[in-house]
Amino acid sequence: MNITVSPGNPLQGQITVPGDKSISHRAALLAALADGDSEIQNFLSAGVTQVMLNALVELGVHFEIDHATLIVHGRGPDALRVPDRPINCGNSATTMRLLTGFLAATGIPAILDGSSGLRKRPMARIVDPLKMMGVPVEASDACTAPLILHKRALGQKLHALDYAMPIASAQVKSTLLFASLAADGPCLIHEPGPSRDHTELLLNSLSIQVSNREYVGENHQMLRTIALTPPGFLSMPPISMIVPGDISSAAFLIVGAAIVKGSDLQVMQCGINPTRTGLLDALKGMGANITTSGERHHNGEPIGEIHVRFNPMTGIEINGPLVVRMIDEFPAFTTAAVFSQGETRISGAEELRHKESDRITSMVDEFRILGAQIDEYRDGYSISGSSMLNGGLVQAHGDHRLAMALSIAGLAAQSPICIQGAEIMSESFPGFFETLRQLGAKVSAE
């Protein structure tokens, strides 16, 4: 599908965005361990979560979903079954990594595989520490998918973990936290900076003892240690929760309003977890007119409203812990930087090369097609921003976030931008273009 976005109209109005992808994944997995029915409202029903739900079907979990409410009929870990075929994780590294931790805790044997793109994603970062815990897991020679988990003896606990993560990664941390539920003692995970803490908050809401301690390291670097005390059993209480709107999806609308004159946008009921609001901090540092209000908490997660009005922005330097706090928002941020005055430089972001696409190279290539002055480095890129960007024909590269970032650029370009392969956006934001139209944007599909 080709989608064309034309300039000329501001974004105005109130909107809610689909449920948070990260929280939806985690809630579904923990509900599968529950003994009883769990109700998860505003669950993200999209391509990236469908593969997780398909995996739960393979494991014998029963559920239904209606109008973004997921009901999981949990019958405890003993009711889970051994899948009779490899579990297809599609293109979702989140599904593969979190499901590996889940299976490691339960001891259920399985093969996890996925798309050719997923087979390129690095898995040593979870395989190595899981082996330290005694998890019988194998990967390819390159330590990529498929992953093979062998059966563990009934009742055999995993070794308690004390592990320093080389990079801050919420997926790796969450994988290890899931596995730690079956450990024979308290587990410690040390990360070089604060990654998103949705797993810790959700586990705490289920009365699992998880604590975070932040401290300053030798090089004045902010470090964090997460401690989990295994409950001694895997069966969880049923979950009743409302998933906040996904700030990673809202990011594109926020940037769209920030770069188009006359825009006045409110994003309602959106997650504003501090580990996820790095983009808001970066945009404010560039001069964007963004405020948050109405903060409240659901299952430990902060939710509120985000108000954005157009305001000229200037370039900024992004590095260090802020990179982790906005790792999924760099495509949206890049659009903002292109329309800002002066230079923006991103460093310490090599992890972007291991997403749905090599996001550094693909963003540089596609924005150059549109006339942006952008240079690529090993661990980042730099942008000489201006208010001028040409229209043209660009490619999504099978990356939902890149496709949405290029679409938003069309709101402020000199002429329309056409995105080929735009259907990939439904992986994380079903109805993205309908939402843009609702807010006043000029959008056409062919």
Image: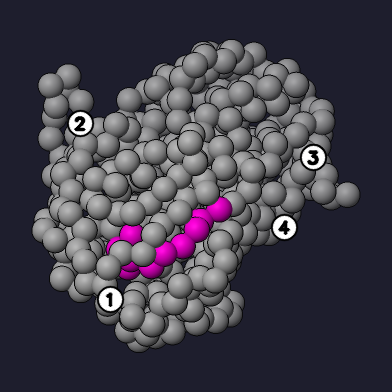
| Residue at image mark 2 | 222
Ranked by sequence position, the earlier of labels 3 and 2 is 2
Q: In this view, does 213 lie above or below 199?
A: above
Of circles 1 and 2, the one toward us is 1
- Quarter of the image for residue 157 reads bottom left
Mark 1 residue type: Met
Please identify the residue farthest to the right as the structure is shown.
Answer: 446
How far apart are the two marked residues, 4 and 2, measured between alpha carbons?
Answer: 41 Å
What is the distance, in whole Å, between disc 1 and disc 4 at their CAs? 38 Å
* Residue with the mark numbered 3: 420
The reply, left or right, for residue 96 in relation to residue 119 is left
Query: The residue under label 2 is which amino acid type?
Result: Met
Q: What colour scheme was applied to this rendering of the protein?
A: one colour
Determine the residue positioned at 29% across, 31% down: 166
Image spot of residue 137 (x, y percent): 38, 51
Single out the mark in the foreground, 4 or 3: 3
Q: How far apart are marks 1 and 3 (CA)?
A: 44 Å
Q: Going from the N terminus, do you reach mark 1 or mark 2 first? A: 2
Relative image position of residue 94 (x, y in whole percent) = 47, 51
Residue at 70% x, 26% y: name it. 366
| Residue beneath the point at 38% across and 74% down | 31
